[in-house]
Image (cartoon, rainbow, N blue to C red):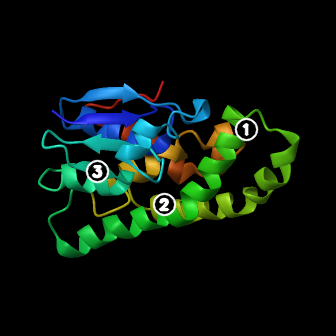
Amino acid sequence: MPTVYGDIQSGNCYKIALLFSQLEIEHDWREILVVNGETRTEDFLALNPAGQIPVVVLDNDEVLTQSNAILNLFASDTHLMPTDPLDRFRVQEWQFYEQYNHEPTIAVRRFIKKFLGLPPERRSEYDSKEAPGYRALEVMEKRLANHEFLVGNSYSVADISLYAYTHVADEGGFDLSRFPGIGYWLQRVRQQPGYLSMS
Protein backbone atom coordinates (compact mmCIF):
# COMPACT_ATOMS: atom_id res chain seq x y z
CA MET A 1 0.00 0.00 0.00
CA PRO A 2 1.58 3.32 -1.05
CA THR A 3 2.14 6.10 1.46
CA VAL A 4 1.31 9.60 0.29
CA TYR A 5 2.84 12.69 1.88
CA GLY A 6 0.76 15.69 0.97
CA ASP A 7 -1.59 18.53 1.81
CA ILE A 8 -5.12 17.98 0.48
CA GLN A 9 -5.51 21.76 0.01
CA SER A 10 -2.58 21.73 -2.42
CA GLY A 11 -3.77 21.17 -5.97
CA ASN A 12 -0.73 19.08 -6.79
CA CYS A 13 -1.49 16.77 -3.85
CA TYR A 14 -5.23 16.80 -4.47
CA LYS A 15 -4.54 15.32 -7.92
CA ILE A 16 -3.19 12.20 -6.25
CA ALA A 17 -6.05 11.98 -3.77
CA LEU A 18 -8.60 12.32 -6.57
CA LEU A 19 -6.92 9.71 -8.77
CA PHE A 20 -6.58 7.24 -5.90
CA SER A 21 -10.24 7.72 -5.01
CA GLN A 22 -11.39 7.19 -8.59
CA LEU A 23 -9.20 4.12 -9.06
CA GLU A 24 -9.96 2.83 -5.55
CA ILE A 25 -6.28 2.60 -4.65
CA GLU A 26 -5.79 1.97 -0.94
CA HIS A 27 -3.14 4.20 0.54
CA ASP A 28 -1.84 5.76 3.73
CA TRP A 29 -2.21 9.56 3.58
CA ARG A 30 0.16 11.59 5.78
CA GLU A 31 -0.67 15.27 5.96
CA ILE A 32 2.32 17.57 5.40
CA LEU A 33 1.77 21.32 5.65
CA VAL A 34 4.04 23.60 3.63
CA VAL A 35 2.96 26.71 5.55
CA ASN A 36 4.19 25.09 8.78
CA GLY A 37 7.62 24.34 7.29
CA GLU A 38 7.01 20.60 7.35
CA THR A 39 8.58 20.10 3.91
CA ARG A 40 11.85 21.59 5.15
CA THR A 41 12.51 19.13 7.97
CA GLU A 42 15.49 16.79 7.82
CA ASP A 43 13.26 13.72 7.63
CA PHE A 44 11.17 15.07 4.77
CA LEU A 45 14.19 16.31 2.80
CA ALA A 46 15.61 12.80 3.07
CA LEU A 47 12.56 11.68 1.07
CA ASN A 48 12.57 14.56 -1.40
CA PRO A 49 15.57 16.91 -1.39
CA ALA A 50 13.52 19.39 -3.42
CA GLY A 51 11.27 19.88 -0.38
CA GLN A 52 8.09 19.54 -2.43
CA ILE A 53 4.84 17.64 -2.08
CA PRO A 54 3.34 15.28 -3.05
CA VAL A 55 5.66 12.40 -2.35
CA VAL A 56 4.57 8.79 -2.75
CA VAL A 57 6.57 5.98 -1.15
CA LEU A 58 5.91 2.50 -2.55
CA ASP A 59 6.04 -0.76 -0.60
CA ASN A 60 9.56 -1.38 -1.90
CA ASP A 61 10.65 2.05 -0.54
CA GLU A 62 10.91 3.60 -4.00
CA VAL A 63 10.13 7.31 -3.73
CA LEU A 64 8.01 9.05 -6.36
CA THR A 65 7.78 12.82 -6.82
CA GLN A 66 6.15 15.26 -9.27
CA SER A 67 2.36 15.08 -9.28
CA ASN A 68 1.72 14.50 -12.98
CA ALA A 69 4.38 11.81 -13.23
CA ILE A 70 2.77 10.05 -10.27
CA LEU A 71 -0.64 10.29 -11.93
CA ASN A 72 0.68 8.75 -15.12
CA LEU A 73 2.33 5.84 -13.34
CA PHE A 74 -0.77 4.80 -11.41
CA ALA A 75 -3.14 5.46 -14.33
CA SER A 76 -0.95 3.82 -16.97
CA ASP A 77 -3.04 0.65 -17.43
CA THR A 78 -6.45 2.06 -16.52
CA HIS A 79 -9.36 3.74 -18.27
CA LEU A 80 -7.94 7.11 -17.20
CA MET A 81 -4.98 6.82 -19.57
CA PRO A 82 -5.74 6.72 -23.32
CA THR A 83 -4.43 3.76 -25.27
CA ASP A 84 -3.94 5.70 -28.50
CA PRO A 85 -0.30 6.94 -28.70
CA LEU A 86 -1.29 10.38 -29.97
CA ASP A 87 -3.85 10.79 -27.19
CA ARG A 88 -1.20 9.78 -24.66
CA PHE A 89 0.96 12.52 -26.10
CA ARG A 90 -1.95 14.96 -25.75
CA VAL A 91 -2.25 14.02 -22.08
CA GLN A 92 1.38 14.94 -21.49
CA GLU A 93 1.00 18.04 -23.63
CA TRP A 94 -1.71 19.33 -21.29
CA GLN A 95 0.25 18.26 -18.20
CA PHE A 96 3.35 20.14 -19.29
CA TYR A 97 1.13 23.14 -20.02
CA GLU A 98 -0.37 22.86 -16.55
CA GLN A 99 3.01 22.91 -14.83
CA TYR A 100 4.59 25.58 -17.03
CA ASN A 101 1.75 28.05 -17.68
CA HIS A 102 -1.20 27.24 -15.43
CA GLU A 103 0.17 26.27 -12.02
CA PRO A 104 2.82 29.05 -11.80
CA THR A 105 0.12 31.69 -12.20
CA ILE A 106 -3.18 30.36 -10.86
CA ALA A 107 -1.78 28.26 -8.01
CA VAL A 108 0.76 30.87 -6.89
CA ARG A 109 -1.85 33.64 -6.89
CA ARG A 110 -4.20 31.42 -4.86
CA PHE A 111 -1.42 30.60 -2.38
CA ILE A 112 -0.59 34.28 -1.85
CA LYS A 113 -4.23 35.22 -1.26
CA LYS A 114 -5.69 32.18 0.51
CA PHE A 115 -2.79 30.93 2.60
CA LEU A 116 -0.64 34.04 3.12
CA GLY A 117 -3.49 36.55 3.39
CA LEU A 118 -2.19 38.76 0.57
CA PRO A 119 0.68 40.42 2.47
CA PRO A 120 1.78 43.85 1.15
CA GLU A 121 5.25 42.61 0.26
CA ARG A 122 3.78 40.10 -2.20
CA ARG A 123 1.04 42.31 -3.66
CA SER A 124 3.02 43.13 -6.81
CA GLU A 125 3.72 39.43 -7.41
CA TYR A 126 0.03 38.65 -6.90
CA ASP A 127 -0.97 41.34 -9.39
CA SER A 128 1.61 40.17 -11.94
CA LYS A 129 0.00 36.71 -12.06
CA GLU A 130 -3.44 37.96 -13.09
CA ALA A 131 -2.99 38.48 -16.84
CA PRO A 132 -0.98 35.28 -17.51
CA GLY A 133 -3.43 33.34 -15.34
CA TYR A 134 -6.34 34.49 -17.45
CA ARG A 135 -4.39 33.60 -20.58
CA ALA A 136 -3.91 30.07 -19.22
CA LEU A 137 -7.65 29.78 -18.63
CA GLU A 138 -8.40 31.14 -22.10
CA VAL A 139 -6.35 28.33 -23.66
CA MET A 140 -8.42 25.79 -21.75
CA GLU A 141 -11.64 27.56 -22.72
CA LYS A 142 -10.80 27.30 -26.43
CA ARG A 143 -10.62 23.54 -26.09
CA LEU A 144 -13.51 23.05 -23.68
CA ALA A 145 -15.94 25.33 -25.47
CA ASN A 146 -16.36 22.56 -28.08
CA HIS A 147 -15.18 19.40 -26.30
CA GLU A 148 -16.38 17.62 -23.18
CA PHE A 149 -12.87 16.74 -22.01
CA LEU A 150 -9.30 17.84 -22.65
CA VAL A 151 -8.15 14.75 -24.56
CA GLY A 152 -10.21 12.64 -26.94
CA ASN A 153 -13.81 12.06 -25.98
CA SER A 154 -13.42 10.79 -22.44
CA TYR A 155 -12.25 11.79 -18.98
CA SER A 156 -8.56 11.17 -18.37
CA VAL A 157 -5.62 12.10 -16.15
CA ALA A 158 -5.26 15.24 -18.27
CA ASP A 159 -8.54 16.43 -16.78
CA ILE A 160 -7.38 15.56 -13.26
CA SER A 161 -4.16 17.53 -13.78
CA LEU A 162 -5.94 20.68 -14.90
CA TYR A 163 -8.99 20.37 -12.67
CA ALA A 164 -6.95 20.51 -9.46
CA TYR A 165 -6.12 24.21 -9.54
CA THR A 166 -8.77 25.36 -12.03
CA HIS A 167 -11.71 24.49 -9.79
CA VAL A 168 -10.31 26.68 -7.00
CA ALA A 169 -9.02 29.49 -9.23
CA ASP A 170 -11.61 31.82 -7.72
CA GLU A 171 -9.69 31.54 -4.42
CA GLY A 172 -6.89 33.35 -6.23
CA GLY A 173 -9.16 36.09 -7.48
CA PHE A 174 -9.98 34.67 -10.92
CA ASP A 175 -13.51 35.08 -12.27
CA LEU A 176 -14.45 31.69 -13.71
CA SER A 177 -17.84 32.94 -14.87
CA ARG A 178 -15.99 34.37 -17.86
CA PHE A 179 -15.36 30.81 -19.09
CA PRO A 180 -18.60 28.87 -19.72
CA GLY A 181 -16.79 25.95 -21.37
CA ILE A 182 -14.64 25.52 -18.29
CA GLY A 183 -17.72 25.83 -16.09
CA TYR A 184 -19.52 22.95 -17.79
CA TRP A 185 -16.32 20.89 -17.76
CA LEU A 186 -15.97 21.42 -14.00
CA GLN A 187 -19.48 20.03 -13.59
CA ARG A 188 -18.63 16.99 -15.72
CA VAL A 189 -15.52 16.26 -13.66
CA ARG A 190 -17.55 16.41 -10.43
CA GLN A 191 -19.95 13.84 -11.90
CA GLN A 192 -17.22 11.24 -12.47
CA PRO A 193 -17.37 8.02 -10.40
CA GLY A 194 -15.26 8.18 -7.28
CA TYR A 195 -15.07 11.97 -7.28
CA LEU A 196 -13.46 13.37 -4.16
CA SER A 197 -13.84 16.96 -2.96
CA MET A 198 -10.78 18.94 -1.91
CA SER A 199 -12.51 20.08 1.30
Please state which amino acid type lies under the numbered disc 1.
Answer: Lys
Question: In the image, 60: left or right of 118?
Answer: left
Q: Secondary structure at mark 1?
A: helix
* Vertical placement of residue 128 versus 1, above or below: below
Looking at this view, is 154 or 87 the one in front?
87
Which of the 4 image quadrants contains residue 27?
Answer: top left
Report the Cα–Cα distance between label 3 and label 2.
19 Å
Residue beneath label 3, please? 64
Of the residues under marks 3 and 2, which one precedes in the sequence? Answer: 3
Q: Are marks 3 and 1 in contact (CB under 8 Å)?
A: no
Report the Cα–Cα distance between label 2 and label 1.
20 Å
Q: Which mark is residue 14?
A: none
The answer to whether residue 139 is seen in the rendering is: yes
Of the residues under marks 3 and 1, which one precedes in the sequence? Answer: 3
Q: Nearer the viewer, mark 3 or mark 1?
A: 3
Residue depicted at x 43% and y 67%: 96
Residue beneath label 1, please? 113
Residue depicted at x 65% and y 42%: 110
Q: Secondary structure at mark 3?
A: strand
Please state which amino acid type lies under the numbered disc 3.
Answer: Leu
Location of residue 87 in the rendering, given as x and y in whole percent from the top left corner: 25, 69
Residue beneath label 2, please? 98
Please state which amino acid type lies under the numbered disc 2.
Answer: Glu
